[in-house]
Image (cartoon, rainbow, N blue to C red):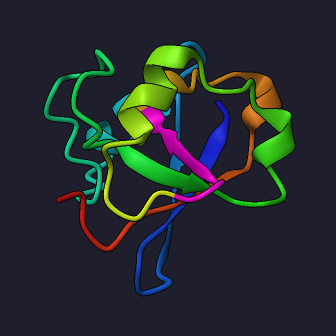
């Protein structure tokens, strides 16, 4: 199973195992990563699964589609590393993905 490393706003790392095909958001919720609220359940409609992809991984992910990009315009403190974790599908190629979590989603 691919591993995902979540780094909270204070710098604490939590490594979780994720199933291939599930979203990074789903892996976070299943493993108690509280900074991912996931209020819309993964339908790209709320932005409460906002995260920052570590710079070493940014080029390895597909670019956000127009719907995700529109939602990213609404999140708190977006930057060039911002993504919605509901829109990132876990694969073997993402083993070791490092995801930084915002201090708050609102």
77 left or right of 69 in image: left
For this rendering, which residue is in front, 93 or 102? Answer: 102
Q: Note whether residue 34 is visible.
A: yes
Question: Would you identify the image quadrant in which residue 35 lies?
Answer: bottom left
88 left or right of 75 in image: right
Which residue is at a point 42% across and 72% down the rendered structure image? 8
In the displayed structure, 89 sits above or below 54; it is: above
Which region of the structure is painted magenta?
79-85
Residue 20, given in percent of the width and then of the height, sits at: 60, 18
Residue 46, given in percent of the width and then of the height, sits at: 22, 32
In the displayed structure, 56 sits above or below 104; it is: above
For this rendering, which residue is in front, 23 or 59? Answer: 59
Residue 30, given in percent of the width and then of the height, sits at: 29, 37
Q: Indicate the quadrant containing the N terminus: top left, top right, bottom left or bottom right.
A: top right
Question: Would you identify the image quadrant in which residue 72 lies?
Answer: top left
Residue 27, given in percent of the width and then of the height, sits at: 41, 35
Which residue is at a point 36% across and 32% down the rendered structure image? 71
For this rendering, which residue is in front, 30 or 41? Answer: 41
Question: Would you identify the image quadrant in which residue 39 lies?
Answer: top left
Q: Indicate the quadrant containing the C terminus: top left, top right, bottom left or bottom right.
A: bottom left
Q: Note whether residue 23 is visible.
A: no
28 left or right of 79 in image: left
């Amino acid at each position: 199973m691919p591993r995902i490393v979540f780094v909270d706003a204070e710098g604490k790392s939590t490594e979780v195992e994720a199933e291939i095909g599930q979203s990074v958001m789903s892996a976070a919720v299943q493993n108690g990563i509280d900074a991912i609220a996931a209020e819309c359940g993964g339908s790209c409609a709320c932005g409460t699964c906002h995260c920052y992809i570590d710079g070493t991984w940014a080029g390895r992910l597909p670019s956000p589609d127009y719907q995700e990009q529109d939602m990213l315009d609404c999140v708190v403190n977006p930057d060039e590393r911002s993504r919605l974790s509901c829109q990132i599908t876990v694969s073997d190629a993402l083993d070791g993905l490092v995801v930084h979590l915002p201090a708050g989603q609102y």
